[in-house]
Image (cartoon, coloured by chain):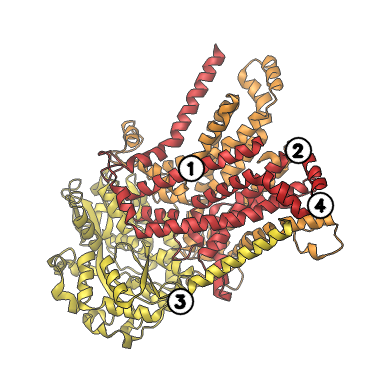
Chain colours: A yellow, B orange, C red
Amino acid sequence: MTPTTMTVAVALAIGAIACAGSAQAQQAEKLYLFNWTEYMDPEIIEAFEAEYDVEVVQSYFNSLPEMTAKLNAGGVSQYDIIVPSGYYVPRLIQSGLVQKLDKSKIPNLDNLMPEFADPAFDPGAEYSVAYQWGISGIVYDTETFPDAPKSWSLLFDPEVTGNQPFSLMGDGQVSMGAACAYLGAGYDCNDPESWKAAARLLLATKHRNTFSGFTDGTPTLQQIQRGVIRAGLTYNGDYLQQKEENPEAFETIDFMVPEEGTEMWVDSMMIPAQAPHPELAHEFINFILDAKIGAQLSNYIYYASPNQAAVPELDPVLTQPPVLPTDEDRANLAFTPSLDGQNLQIFQQLWTEVQSR
Amino acid sequence: MADSPYPLAPYSHSLSPDTRHLLWSVAPGVVWIVIFLVLPSLYLISVAFMTNGPYGQPQMPLSLASFRQLAGFGFLGWSPGNLYTLLRSLWQTLVATGLVVLIAYPIAYHISTCRRQWRAIMLLAVVVPSWTNQVIRAFGWMNLLSPGTPISQVAQFFGFIGPNMGLYPSNFAVTLGLMYNFLPFMVLPLYAAFEKLDTGLVEAARDLYASPLRAFWHAVFPQTLPGLLAGTVLVSIPAFGMYVIPELLGGGRAMMLGNLVASQFSGGSNWPLGAAGALIMLLATLGGLYAMRKVGKRLGGGEEVVI
Amino acid sequence: MRRSAFRRSLTLFWWLMVAFLYLPLGVIVLYSFNAANSAAYFAGFSLRWYERLLGNDQLLTALGNTLVLGVASSVIALVIGTLIGYGMYRHRRRKLGWLIALIYLPIVMPDIVFGISEMAFFITLDREFGVLGPSLATMIIAHVTFQIPFVALIVYSRFVGLDPTLFEAAKDLYASPFQRARHFLLPTLKPSLVAAFFLAFTLSVDDFVISFFTAGPENATLPIYIWGAIRRGVSPEINAIATLMILSVAIAAVISLLFNKESRRN
């Protein structure tokens, strides 16, 4: 081969890549689902695939910042369904990353409990449909902490934590909220002054010897199982799911709702602005809202269902704490505030500061 | 030199056939690297001078806001967080490179003095671990340094860490991970230097100077300098921009520049700030390349220093 | 006497370093056969984590992506890199500083800057012109970019090791450049090309950062999958996949070495 022939070969190879790229986009019907890890029953996916004769491609994220980053990195035209938490919904709508739902294509919307039909983060539920809801709370080892107070002091007060390793949540807004709650400003604190105090507390906390890191909710459960930490922040449903899977390891591991208050979240299904298969995405949302499927989903992933019609089919474990909080605990729950504009930038600067120092 | 680095030139008929041949043979590669690496880097640099949009996307007008932010000036006055990150990156790079040099010197010398048929195998033994994925290597250290593992228990026994704790996650684990990752990059060029060592000169030095240390300093060290320099560039520049190791082994107290940059493109979502951080790494890269060429030439090693 | 003590301590130091280098990998291999889900103790030999791998569709997809990416990028890089290596050799008496600098750029540039600048570039191209959105194609492009220099350097060093008069002889023997390439250059280069291909392939399989930032949603490779699995929480399955990867890299390394050796011997 002369250099010239080789150049031609390269040109051909480049052409081949380009074709491969475009061919990929034109393949048969697939639904691209971008979801939290451990948040779906594989049998539901199989049922959907069988009923609609499509293939479901699942991708996963561990935190909302990660999800948003992927969405910005081209995901907006590559995923059909995303499942963000409430406080990210407004910023997704405002930055044009999601599309309005065609409610006529989702008849099962009637199955939703009334309180989920008009959420504060998406008035009229024009863009989002509730998927599941849950609580972020403290998971801890009862052997290490036999007299653990029902309080954030387990993490933030060095006297209470003692020399035990612990972690905080990787999502800055949840960790900041927890610090705010401990300082008495409430989990849903939303002003720079409270944030600054919370950031100072987080900085002091992270420089304690036994702090092991900012860890996302699901990995926290793995770490506590393996003894890397003795206390941390996680989600109630993931806790139950892991406990069910591995009862021995979780014998002495408990979940609590601190009385200073903590996060209640609603995860919602949304369709990205340039989703490749919006029709199918609507079908999928409708499918999840089905009474039977809704119950199957909650029974599998151990989260509370927003689906009224599914309630009769739910396992008993889903109708008691920690899935459904007691009335007393419920009074202490708050949504994570949704941030935008200057507030968002101030928050992010403070959070970067906490991580850097 | 008449030929330009840009391969548009082959269309000009005033060039000699020899020059045309050169340009044709290197054109595909040069065009590829220019389009898919130089151009993206230039784009990233331009992003550093843009304004941060409401959700982290770069916007006009041009400004220096991202550099002010990188220096710590924000909505809340000055704060040292980013400088901490920068200093931590420098410190980790310095410590890891220093330790790697200390390990690599005797190792490279040892290999060069072994029997010829062993040398290739010994070099292979040094290099093979670095051919496995760096995520897997970091994961190996996570396994080794977690609380309750023998190494952590030994460290506890000597009081380096508190009870119930492990050596991972920590800044120490990051240093260790960096050393582990980059050791081969130092051993190889140093070995090349030792292999070319003028042994007559060393013998003469042994007669000339009383202590082995002085003999080393005057006769051996200057000859290995090109290798040391190449190794330092190959270790320190990627270490300075490391992302995976602090992320996996650091545990929230070990953020380095690479993590700051990555987080601005993901969670923090401030592209211009991230690009400004990347610009610092890019400058360090170019500086390293330049220094290597300059000093390499002065030492007579020429271009082949690294190869 | 003193000299042999020095030698012995050097040998000891060497073996300590070998232990340091292989301990983390050995631990992964060991725990991949651990019956218990623990990093702290070994509960007995078991193949359960390997059995779990077999039924893991995502993992198999990731494996497929890794292979396609590795082979496609290595083939392209082989062609382009060989041309550069050849050009560099033929014109080694010219001032090629700019070319050398350009070739070292992908080697020396930190992964994260490499990956992020490509990501930002591709995303912006996709948004403005609708081409080159993150996908397998963008990953191949990025991988080729960092593979080219290594291929070029291997081929170049092979040429440097040849007797220059061979080229003259070939010129006399074969009239056309095409014949020269076919009957002289390619056969001479063959072992180096195989070595370069395997090196490029290894580099591709090893890369995480650049793949991570240029991948589309459907393009997770094995390293990306492992990264996700570690971030999700440490599962012992990771030990099993990692063991398989260590094994395959070791095999590729040995092949590359053998061919490179052969190329030197000829």
Left or right, B112 with respect to B57, comes to: right
**Which of disc 2 and disc 4 is earlier in sequence?**
2
Q: State how far apart marks 2 and 1 are (Cα).
A: 32 Å
**Location of residue B235 with respect to C147 vertically, above or below:** above
Q: How many marks?
A: 4
Q: Amino acid at mark 3?
A: Ser
Q: Chain of mark 1?
A: C
Which SS class for mark 3? loop
Q: Nearer the viewer, mark 4 or mark 2?
A: 4
The residue that disc 1 covers is: C251
Query: Where A19 falls versus B192 (above or below)?
Result: below
Q: Nearer the viewer, mark 4 or mark 3?
A: 4
- Disc 4 vs disc 1: which is toward the camera? 4
Tell me what residue is drawn at x 19 percent, y 48 percent: A145
Disc 3 versus disc 1: nearer the observer: 1
| Residues tagged 2 and 1 counted as in contact (Cβ below 8 A) | no
Report the residue marked by disc 3: A95
- Could you tell me residue A179's position as x and y percent? 31, 59
Residue A243, quarter of picture: bottom left
- Callout 4 environment at 10 Å: few (<14), some (14 to 19), or many (20+)? few
Q: Which residue is more in the foreground, A292 or C104?
A: A292
Of residue A253 and residue B10, the one placed in the foreground of this image is B10
Give the CA distance from mark 4 to mark 3: 65 Å
Q: Which label is found at residue C163?
A: 2
Mark before the other along the chain sequence, 4 or 1: 4
Of all chains, the one bearing label 4 is C
The three-letter code of the residue at mark 2 reads Asp
Query: Which of the pair C54/B217 is nearer the observer?
Result: C54
**Mark 4 on the same chain as mark 1:** yes
